[in-house]
Image: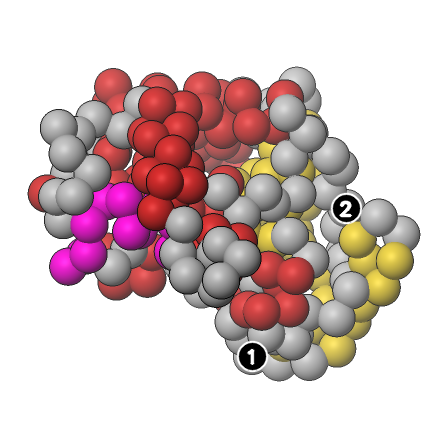
């Protein structure tokens, strides 16, 4: 990202994300971190600046552009932005990849759909008795796994996670953290946007602090600890 700017939201954002790296972004309310995430996913595109992927210019002007560039986004509010609550667990999992599941006649390949759903339920340990149940029947942690599986099924190279464990219990949080680290080990570049300091320290290689739409500081997790990071966040309010 070079000089990425969206007036009123963020300005002159510069950073790199490497394959297999987990980059944390944090800041106080109004810092511009969620607006930056939505810009990278094409929901509210930046007005100026450039994005390069693998050294090549990438034009991210819409969500479709982001998907074509193999970018996935797990939003902050999974209930209103990440899931179709009235639909089944299974249909939520495959919703982003239905086109790839058509047979030669242009119809949905039911067997392939069912196999894909079963694979992701197993891979992400989604706890359910029946994938035909509405996704709203799941616990918060399992709902978050469904949102993750939806984007992982699209085989992203870049995954943006905004508040990945908000509203889940401690046990599910630890499991989700391990899933995030496992995904990075498989080469996905991951951005974690969070104000949960233990979460950032447990998962990230580097952390960027944002303040009033700008990057205030870059840190590696080896350079800091939870107490020092908490202090820096408090200082951003000054």
Report the residue at 39% width, 56% height from top.
108
* Disc number placed over residue 160 in the picture, else none: none
Q: How many numbered callouts? A: 2
The local secondary structure at tag 1 comes to loop
For mark 1, what is the residue? 8
Q: Secondary structure at mark 2?
A: loop
In the depicted structure, whether residue 157 falls above or below residue 81: above
The percent position of residue 207, horizontal first and vertical second, equals: 61, 37
Mark 2 nearby-residue class (10 Å; few <14, some 14–19, many ≥20): few
Q: Is residue 204 above or below residue 43?
A: above
- Residue at 33% in and 56% down: 82
Residue 105 appears anywhere in the view: yes
Quadrant location, the N terminus = bottom right
**Is 179 covered by the magenta stretch?**
no
Query: At 79% from the left edge and 53% from the top edge, which residue is drawn?
Result: 53
Residue 32 visible: no
| Residue 87 falls inside the magenta stretch | yes
Q: Quadrant of residue 47?
A: bottom right
The colour scheme used to paint the residues is: secondary structure
Q: Residues within 10 Å of mark 1 (few under 14, many from 20)?
A: few
**Location of residue 153 in the rendering, given as x and y in whole percent from the top left corner:** 49, 42
Q: Is residue 158 left or right of residue 30?
A: right
Looking at the image, which residue is at 29% across and 51% down?
91
Q: Position of residue 98 (x, y in %)?
A: 44, 56
Residue 7 image point, x, y percent: 62, 80
- Residue 3, placed above or below residue 145: below
Q: Earlier in the sequence, mark 2 or mark 1?
A: 1
Q: Nearer the viewer, residue 163 or 189?
A: 189
Marks 2 and 1 sit apart, C-alpha to C-alpha, by 23 Å
- For discs 2 and 1, the disc positioned in front in the rendered view: 2
Q: Which residues are magenta?
A: 85-97
Q: Which residue is mark 2?
A: 16
């Amino acid at each position: 990202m070079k000089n990425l700017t969206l007036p009123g939201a963020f300005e002159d954002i510069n950073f790199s994300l490497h394959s297999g790296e987990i980059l944390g972004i944090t800041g106080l309310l109004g810092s511009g971190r969620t607006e930056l995430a939505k810009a990278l996913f094409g929901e509210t595109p930046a007005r100026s600046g450039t994005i390069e992927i693998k050294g090549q210019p990438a034009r991210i002007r819409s969500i479709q552009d982001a998907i074509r560039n193999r970018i996935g986004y797990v939003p902050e509010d999974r209930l209103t932005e990440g899931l179709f609550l009235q639909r089944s667990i299974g249909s939520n999992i495959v919703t982003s990849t239905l086109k790839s599941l058509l047979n030669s006649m242009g119809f949905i390949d039911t067997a392939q759909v069912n196999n894909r759903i079963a694979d992701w339920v197993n891979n992400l340990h989604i706890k359910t008795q029946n994938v035909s149940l509405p996704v709203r029947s799941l616990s918060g942690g399992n709902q978050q796994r469904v949102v993750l599986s939806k984007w992982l099924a699209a085989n992203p190279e870049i995954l943006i996670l905004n508040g990945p464990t908000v509203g889940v219990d401690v046990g599910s949080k630890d499991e989700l953290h391990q899933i995030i680290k496992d995904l990075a080990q498989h080469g996905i570049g991951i951005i974690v946007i969070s104000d949960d300091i233990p979460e950032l320290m447990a998962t990230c290689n580097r952390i960027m602090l944002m303040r009033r739409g700008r990057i205030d500081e870059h840190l590696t997790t080896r350079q800091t600890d939870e107490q020092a990071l908490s202090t820096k966040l408090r200082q951003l309010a000054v």
